[in-house]
Image (cartoon, rainbow, N blue to C red):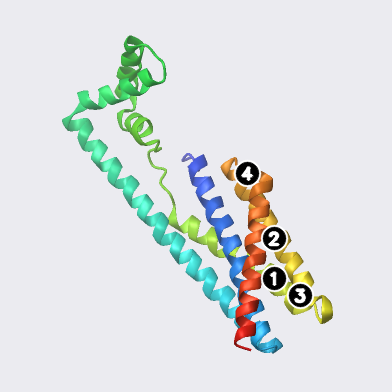
Amino acid sequence: MANKKHMTMDEKLNSIRAGVLGSNDGILTVVGVMFSVSAASGSAFALFIAALSNLISGAFSMASGEYASVSSQSDSEKVVVEREKQLLKTDFEGQQRDVTDFYIQKGISQATAAQISRELLAKKPLETVLSVKYDITLGHYMNPWQAAYSSLICFTIGGLFPLLAMIFIKGPYQFPITIASTTVALAFTGLISSKLSNGFVKKAIWRNIIIGIITIFIHYGLGKIFS
């Protein structure tokens, strides 16, 4: 039975990153369009069509952007692999010096570092060079399709929070509940992004919420101008 290929942590984080960005963008763009259209038109049908079309087009736009971006990164990694393959053939001693220097910088003595370098390059030369020089795991490149799917799905889910709130809540509580649902969704994406980057949780949450509120007021103001 063939061994199952496991994703590296970088690959997993790349998909999660795309998802977090997608959901955050979905929340902000959809709620922005909804408030601007609502302020300008007041038509429930126009609001629904504008929000839905923005949700669909935004999701595919975000996904295509992630695909293009991650494809470029993946191509760059593959170019590096081919270049290092050639260097191992034409300048093996130079590669060995690079690996030795890497371990010396880690605080290992020169003699020990040289011994480690010889042993690693004798067993897995390409894997060793890629790991030491570029922190790349051979055969594990950033997957543009994973990033695109993650962004597409999370953008859609994020945009549904304000969309469903405004559609199903009628009367005087429509706008407050829409803002509240948007705030909760943005706080959640802020929490996830801070955990992924080992950043400040409260700062990330409040930054997302403030940006969301500013987005709502800007779009509502623009809608009022053209109403």
Residue type indicated by callout 4: Lys
Which element type, helix, strand or loop, lies under badge 1?
A: helix
Instruction: Estimate the x, y position of residue 139 in percent, counting from the top left.
Output: 39, 42
3 or 1: mark nearer the eye:
3
Q: Residues within 10 Å of mark 2 (few under 14, many from 20)?
A: many
The tag earlier along the polypeptide, 1 or 4, is 1
Separation (CA) of disc 3 from disc 4: 30 Å
Q: Using the image, tell me which numbered label, if any, was put on residue 100.
A: none
**Residue picked out by circle 3:** 175
Instruction: Estimate the x, y position of residue 182 in percent, counting from the top left.
Output: 70, 65
Separation (CA) of disc 3 from disc 1: 10 Å
| Residue positioned most to the left | 90
Q: Residues within 10 Å of mark 1 (few under 14, many from 20)?
A: many
**Residue picked out by circle 4:** 195
Residue type indicated by callout 1: Pro
Which element type, helix, strand or loop, lies under badge 2?
A: helix
Residue 212 horizontal side relative to residue 87, left or right: right
Separation (CA) of disc 3 from disc 2: 15 Å
Q: 23 or 7, which lies in front?
A: 23
Give the residue drawn at x 49%, y 55%. 146
Instruction: Estimate the x, y position of residue 66 in percent, counting from the top left.
Output: 46, 60
The tag earlier along the polypeptide, 3 or 1, is 1
Q: Visible in this render: residue 51?
A: no
**Residue picked out by circle 1:** 162
Residue type indicated by callout 2: Ala
**Residue picked out by circle 2:** 185
The tag earlier along the polypeptide, 1 or 2, is 1
Residue 194 horizontal side relative to residue 13, left or right: right
